[in-house]
């Protein structure tokens, strides 16, 4: 039996979710909470499989509630329920340990499917959020210089070869001030502070000879 705790401060929402869950023969609502305090107390004393957590609670931010639940119960599956667009919050909650992110407007059709997937050890996200997660992971795997624009990369390599901003400007037919702007931008993107950092990076990654 999949035992679910519902955490939401709206009675109508809780009632609707409970009906959807208890229509399934292998699911039951093990408890309901209207705020973070009740949620923590209920989870500590209840044998539950999964928590359906609204991120907009009256006493605590949903992100903080998620972090505390995962700290106290690392193996507990938590399905986030939200009215906020997933492109604003979805990836953030998944990275923080949520097992899934579900928009409230999609709950009637998606809730049971989401609970089953999360209960089986998977992650439940929409197709569009899954694509964003893949893009995010791909970006993490890329070396920092691949996030530079073509012009930024060009200027980084010229700086790394020892050219001054004035010389770079003359080479590229742009002003020294423009080169300085590009330099500041690429240093920020590369999380570096000095030209020496750029030289070391370029040599290490064989961007210059």
Image (cartoon, grey):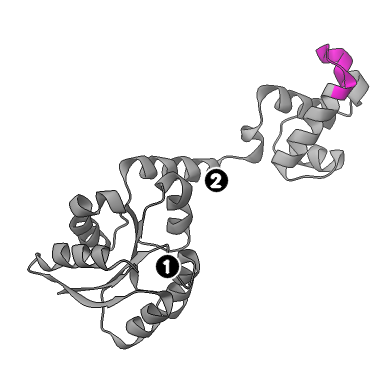
In this picture, is 34 found above or below 196? below
Would you say residue 209 is visible in this rendering?
no
Residue drawn at (9%, 65%) of the image: 23
Q: Is residue 183 left or right of residue 147?
A: right
Q: Which residues are magenta?
A: 168-177
Observer-side mark, 1 or 2, equals: 1
In this picture, is 90 found above or below 145? below
Residue drawn at (18%, 58%) of the image: 112
Quadrant of the image containing the N terminus: bottom left
Q: Is residue 133 left or right of residue 187?
A: left
Q: Is residue 122 left or right of residue 156?
A: left
Quadrant of the image containing the C terminus: top right
Q: Where does the image place residue 92, in percent across and percent down from the top left? A: 48, 54
In this picture, is 55 found above or below 191? below
Residue drawn at (78%, 25%) of the image: 155
Mark 1, residue position: 57
Residue 92 is one of the magenta-drawn residues: no
């Amino acid at each position: 039996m999949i035992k679910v705790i519902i955490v939401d401060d709206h009675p109508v929402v809780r009632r609707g979710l409970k009906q959807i869950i208890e229509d399934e023969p292998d699911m039951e609502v093990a408890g309901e909470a209207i705020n973070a305090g009740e949620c923590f107390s209920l989870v500590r004393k209840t044998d539950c499989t999964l928590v359906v957590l609204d991120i907009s609670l009256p006493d605590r931010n949903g992100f903080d509630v998620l972090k505390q639940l995962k700290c106290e119960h690392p193996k507990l599956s938590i399905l986030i329920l939200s009215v906020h667009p997933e492109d604003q919050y979805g990836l953030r909650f998944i990275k923080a340990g949520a097992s899934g992110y579900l928009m409230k407007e999609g709950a009637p059709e998606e809730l049971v499917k989401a609970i089953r997937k999360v209960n089986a050890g998977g992650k439940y996200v929409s197709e569009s959020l899954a694509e964003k997660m893949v893009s995010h992971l791909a970006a993490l795997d890329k070396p920092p210089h691949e996030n530079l624009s073509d012009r930024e990369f060009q200027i980084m390599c010229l700086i790394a070869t020892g050219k001054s901003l004035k010389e770079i400007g003359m080479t590229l037919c742009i002003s020294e001030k423009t080169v300085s702007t590009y330099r500041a931008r690429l240093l920020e993107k590369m999380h570096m502070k000095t030209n020496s950092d750029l030289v070391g990076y370029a040599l290490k990654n064989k961007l210059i000879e």
